[in-house]
Image: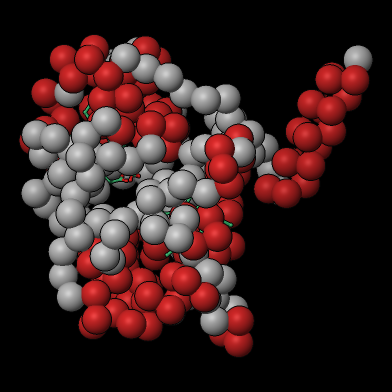
Amino acid sequence: MKTTLRVSFAATVLVAMTGCAAPGFLDLRAPVAVSGNADAGAQKAAVCTACHGPNGVSPIPTFPNIAGQKADYLYWQLVEFQRKVKPDSPMTAIVAGLSDTDLRDLAAHFAAQTPAPASGDANAFADGARLYREGDPARGFVPCQGCHGANADGNVGGGEARYRAYPSLRGQHSPYLVQRLQDFRNDKYALSSNDHIMHGVTQALDDQAIAQVAGWLQAAPP
Ligand code: HEC
Ligand code: HEC
């Protein structure tokens, strides 16, 4: 009885928070841990390499690196593509025929790959480093590290469930990051509670701030 009450209360809060409960909307405020078989995932990953590189480091700077990304984040992104709630993406067709086990195995496989190394001159992005670490309260910029980790590797909250699907950003291609941040700002995604978080975060950011923080993340020293 207690559990039921708590669940329906959570649902009410979520509806109030989002203003609507679109079908397929994901509540990722305390997702269960995702597990998959990385070896099985490796067998299924051939189709991914054309765009994400043989080991998940993408040769195309507008396509994301997925090597070393957190498995929980990878899995939930794949679920969103599969539900066709993410707009205009080559990913939609790719995941259409995959099972839930496939998605878990692929997530486990790419999470186990070596992340892309930093590239670029971090010194050219001192403003981006400051925004990442400290934000700028006067301009409404919140620090990114509170949710993406001091090292931008997505490890925050000591394993607390609500941080499970928070992504690593370190070494990601800057052009991809710029596009994603602009898309969050423009409310292109409203697919999960985590999208709503990033929509809020990006509202105050202008294009210059976005370019700075994205440049720093690609070039950030470990
Ligand atoms: C035809 C090119 C293409 C292929 C093949 C492809 N992807 Fe993607 N993938 C993309 C692009 C482009 C994006 C980013 C665009 C977007 O978000 O809509 C993306 C985004 C992703 C993301 C989200 C990453 C993030 O940081 O949010 C994941 C996870 C992913 N792909 C996994 C896979 C897996 C696993 C496969 C193989 C089963 C695969 N992709 C095959 C082009 C491709
Ligand atoms: C309150 C927590 C929080 C803060 C603060 C925050 N983020 Fe996020 N961020 C998230 C969550 C949760 C997601 C996952 C969204 C999703 O599932 O698509 C995310 C996703 C992202 C992504 C998409 C990554 C990918 O691979 O596609 C980028 C880029 C990003 N954040 C950049 C930033 C930057 C830059 C800042 C600081 C200006 C920031 N975030 C501050 C929680 C936060």
Q: For the point 90% across and 20% down, which residue is it?
A: 2
Residue 161 position in % (x across, y down): 60, 35
Residue 220 position in % (x across, y down): 28, 66
Closest to the observer: 216 or 174?
A: 216
Position of residue 61 in the picture relative to residue 194 (left or right): left
Residue 124 position in % (x across, y down): 23, 82
Which quadrant of the rendered structure holds the N terminus? top right
The reply to whether residue 204 is visible in this rendering is: no
Position of residue 32 in the picture relative to residue 114 (left or right): right
Position of residue 113 in the picture relative to residue 137 (left or right): left
Say if 147 sits above or below 144 in the image. Answer: above
Q: How many marks?
A: 0
Q: For the point 27% across and 19% down, which residue is it?
A: 38
Indicate the quadrant where residue 92 lies.
Answer: top left
Say if 107 sits above or below 21 in the image. Answer: above
Closest to the observer: 153 or 29?
A: 153
Say if 179 sits above or below 51 in the image. Answer: below
The reply to whether residue 154 is visible in this rendering is: yes
